[in-house]
């Protein structure tokens, strides 16, 4: 355990990784402040759970159509330029949202349009972003780097909603959108500072990939049976379980009759659980297969989603979300480690895009369908059904991936 902790500390003492980690943290704090402000604003203007689900779909839906192309861009173009261009568009849109909210001209359809633009730019740039970590660390440190990056994301998940809850109560949503726009600046500066290292890593990619079929890399990844099952597990988790995040404001507002301050606290609870997940990964990385750990966590995540059907207080919901945040982080970070460890340098962006397609694409459809189910059955019954289906699917995937291993063990 001491060796694992020492290696992780050494990784954070690396100037390149530390700068990237800190800039990403600030950017994600801004993102999570908006994650509190936006759904509350949509509900306040429209009062419609369906429009809440539609807004979430607009953010994640473009991943279905564009993230694979984003993976190709990450492997065949300069990754830093891809990030600057598309994330710059997103920053400009945020500045326009701030003006519209401040002047009172904002409408729900405008929020949904901006969400669609954000989803499009994310789909085209996030595979390049996900490919940066292997460019600035050693391959043997990949699992720890992904775990630490997941810890950073979930630390932002704690700080962002906590800050946003206070800001919303005192000043309203406009300051949350403003904070997110400003948070792009340190992230862009860090990418600019890392540019020489990123360009060097990009030049090492074989020219042969430019002569192959556009989707040859995707075919190679999917032909690997275990990679295919891993991607299906990530998709099922996102489709059935991740809507617990998008629809927590419905639970808070309509079931528990609480206010936006308590909603921020609930999202903070999810982040508290999420920040503990990487600790489990770091402690078990040398003793447990990352894919086994991912599947076990995904199964228990489904059970926690089922538990939302019985909540009656914000403390009960917060407790469930602590566990949910922990399990989601372990499931996704472990699956990502498994997939990236199987990837080669010349298809790393495409591997990242398939992971994101499974994660964000599954979330987009899951949010939309859960929104429709919520309108018909109520949010608690909708999440109960989601959790049951998630548990069944994860058990099936675990059996398919590890039945041969179990047979060999029994033969011995």
Image: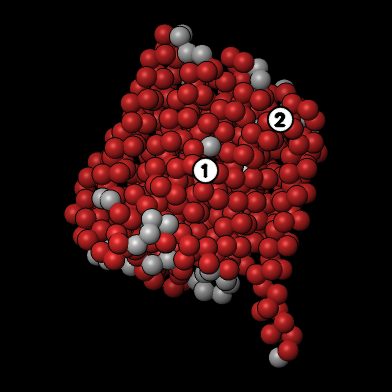
Q: Do labels 2 and 1 touch, CB within 8 Å?
A: no
Numbered tag placed on residue 293 in the rendering: none
For label 1, the crowd category at 10 Å Cα-Cα, with few meaning under 14, some 14 to 19 and many 20 or more, is some
The reply, left or right, for residue 73 in relation to residue 303 is left
For label 2, the crowd category at 10 Å Cα-Cα, with few meaning under 14, some 14 to 19 and many 20 or more, is some
Total marks shown come to 2
At 54% from the left and 60% from the top, the residue drawn is 335
**Residue 410, quarter of the rendered image:** bottom right
Looking at the picture, how far across and down is residue 215, in whole percent? 42, 57
Q: Is residue 140 above or below residue 240?
A: below
**Residue 31, quarter of the rendered image:** top left
Looking at the picture, how far across and down is residue 251, in whole percent? 70, 30
Q: Residue furthest bottom?
A: 412
Numbered tag placed on residue 372 in the rendering: 2
Q: Is residue 285 above or below residue 306?
A: below
At 70% from the left and 84% from the top, the residue drawn is 409
**Residue 258, quarter of the rendered image:** top right
**Secondary structure under badge 2?**
helix
At 29% from the left and 66% from the top, the residue drawn is 208
- Front-most of 159 and 132? 132
Residue 132 appears in the figure: no
Residue 30 appears in the figure: yes
Q: Is residue 384 above or below residue 167?
A: below
Would you name the residue on which mark 1 appears? 64
- Front-most of 111 and 141? 111
Specify how the rendered protein is coloured. secondary structure
- Which of the marked residues, 2 or 1, is nearer the chain's N terminus? 1
At 37% from the left and 39% from the top, the residue drawn is 26
**Secondary structure under badge 1?**
helix
Looking at the picture, how far across and down is residue 297, in whole percent? 65, 58
Looking at the picture, how far across and down is residue 55, in whole percent? 56, 28
Tell me how far mark 2 sits from mark 1, CA to CA. 20 Å
């Amino acid at each position: 355990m001491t060796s694992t902790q020492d290696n992780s500390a050494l990784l954070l003492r690396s100037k390149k990784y530390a700068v990237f980690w800190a800039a990403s943290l600030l950017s994600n704090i801004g993102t999570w402040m908006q994650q509190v402000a936006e759904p509350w604003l949509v509900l306040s203007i429209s009062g419609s759970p369906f429009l809440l689900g539609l807004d979430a779909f607009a953010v994640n839906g473009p991943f279905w159509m564009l993230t694979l192309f984003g993976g190709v861009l990450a492997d065949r173009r300069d990754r830093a330029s891809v990030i600057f261009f598309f994330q710059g568009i997103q920053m400009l849109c945020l500045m326009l949202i701030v003006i519209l909210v401040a002047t009172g001209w904002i409408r729900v359809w405008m929020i949904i349009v901006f969400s669609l633009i954000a989803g499009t730019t994310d789909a085209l740039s996030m595979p390049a972003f996900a490919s940066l970590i292997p460019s600035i660390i050693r391959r043997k440190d990949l699992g720890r780097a992904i775990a630490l990056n997941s810890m950073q994301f979930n630390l932002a998940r704690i700080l962002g909603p906590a800050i946003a809850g206070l800001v919303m109560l005192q000043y309203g949503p406009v300051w949350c959108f403003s904070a997110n726009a400003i948070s792009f600046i340190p992230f862009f500066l860090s990418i600019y500072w890392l540019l020489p290292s990123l360009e060097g890593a990009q030049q090492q990619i074989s020219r042969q990939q430019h002569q192959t079929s556009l989707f040859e890399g995707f075919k190679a990844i999917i032909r690997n049976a275990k990679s295919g099952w891993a991607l299906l597990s990530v998709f099922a988790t996102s489709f059935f379980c991740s809507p617990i995040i998008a629809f927590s404001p419905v639970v808070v507002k309509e079931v528990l009759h609480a206010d936006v301050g308590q909603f921020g606290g609930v999202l903070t609870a999810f982040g508290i659980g999420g920040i503990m997940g990487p600790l489990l990964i770091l402690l078990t990385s040398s003793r447990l297969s990352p894919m086994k750990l991912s599947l076990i966590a995904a199964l228990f995540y489904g059970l926690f989603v089922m538990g939302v059907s019985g909540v009656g207080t914000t403390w009960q919901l917060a407790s469930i979300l602590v566990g949910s945040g922990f399990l989601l982080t372990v499931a996704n970070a472990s699956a990502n480690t498994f997939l990236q460890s199987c990837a080669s340098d010349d298809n790393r962006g495409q591997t990242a895009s398939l992971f994101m397609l499974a994660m964000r694409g599954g979330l987009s459809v899951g949010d939309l369908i859960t929104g429709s189910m919520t309108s018909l059955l109520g949010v608690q019954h909708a999440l109960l059904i989601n959790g049951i289906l998630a548990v069944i699917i994860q058990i099936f995937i675990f059996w398919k991936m590890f039945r041969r291993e179990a047979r060999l063990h029994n033969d011995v």
